Image (spheres, rainbow, N blue to C red):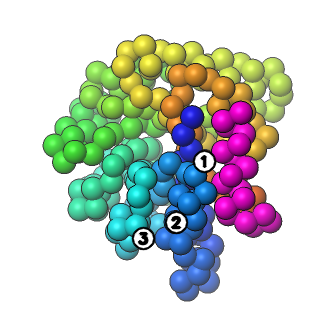
Amino acid sequence: MRLAINIDHIATLRNARGGKEPDPIEAAKICEEAGAEGIVCHLREDRRHIKDEDVRALRRIVTTKLDLEMAAVDDVIRVALEVLPELATFVPERRQELTTEGGLDVRADRRHLEDVIRTFHENKIEVSLFVDPIREQIETSKEIGADMIEIHTGEYANARSEREQNEQFVRIQDAAKLAKSIGLGVNGGHGLNYANVSPIAAIREIDELSIGHAIISHSMFVGLETGVKEMLALIRT
């Protein structure tokens, strides 16, 4: 099980004061040194946290894998094709949302996504699609050329009862098995934290977890290196 860490909220804190601290670039270095195998950042259309210059700086220093989360829109695509991350993860995006609220509708946006995936492959960038654990979305992701999917784990993380959480876990498990059986790589993420991550990490078909907010929040009390190592210990138990 690999761990990729989303550093968006380091930039959120920096931007709150309009200065240079805390520096998401230094955070990325600490995460890698602590054992993370990927750095994730979401370059939103409104640039509310990560900025273009952050992505360029991350490209210069990340030694594991740079995963650029993004909507499939022209101005962000231009940055991605300039920077050339190892992985682009396409996500849905609404200006008013606090965080990503669900998976892509790959079937509805099939033609556009297929064209974008082709362009990214021509530039040797792998593509992941952030999808809900729904068979049709997963199968369409494969059909249009995605290399992998990232299963949206938010409904599992936000479940209000043990029964609901178990139901969502089964959906994720079944989705991971389906994706792997048709040749897709499988990542997972959204809402995962130190209390709920272990069952998801135990799903053998999931290759990598993308976690950000929980680790950054916990690190305010224990330090970023310790926060990363504690999460690694949980997902690799």
Q: Main secondary structure of the magenta part?
A: helix
167 vs 21, left or right, is right
Residue that carries the numbered disc 2 in the rendered image? 29
Q: Which mark is residue 224?
A: none
Q: Quadrant of residue 34?
A: bottom right
Q: Secondary structure at mark 3?
A: helix
Task: Specify whether residue 162 is in view.
Answer: yes
User: Is 232 within the magenta?
Assistant: yes
Q: Based on the picture, tell me whether residue 191 belongs to the magenta stretch.
A: no
Expressed as whole percent of the image width and height from the top left, the position of residue 133 reads: 54, 24
- Distance in Å between CA atoms under marks 3 and 1: 19 Å
At a point 75% along the width and 21% down the height, the residue shown is 166
Query: Separation of disc 2 and disc 1 at Cα?
Result: 16 Å
Extreme residue toward the left, this view: 122
Dot 3 amino acid type? Asp
Residue that mark 1 sits on: 211
Q: Crowding near pointer 3: few (<14 within 10 Å), some, many (20+)?
A: some
Residue 175 sits above or below residue 82 on the image? above
- Around disc 2, counting alpha carbons within 10 Å, would you say few (fewer than 14), some (14 to 19), or many (20 or more)? some
Q: Is residue 24 above or below residue 94?
A: below
Which residue is at a point 53% across and 72% down the rendered structure image?
Answer: 26
At which x and y percent is residue 100?
Answer: 55, 47
The span shown in magenta is 220-237
Q: Nearer the viewer, residue 58 or 145?
A: 58
Q: Is residue 218 left or right of residue 65?
A: right
Which mark lies nearer to you, 2 or 1?
2
Disc nearer the start of the sequence (2/1): 2
* Residue at image point 39% right, 43% down: 90
Image: 120 above or below 60: above
Residue underneath mark 3: 54
Residue type at numbered disc 2: Lys
Please state, as top left, top right, bottom left or bottom right, where the N terminus lies in the image. Answer: top right
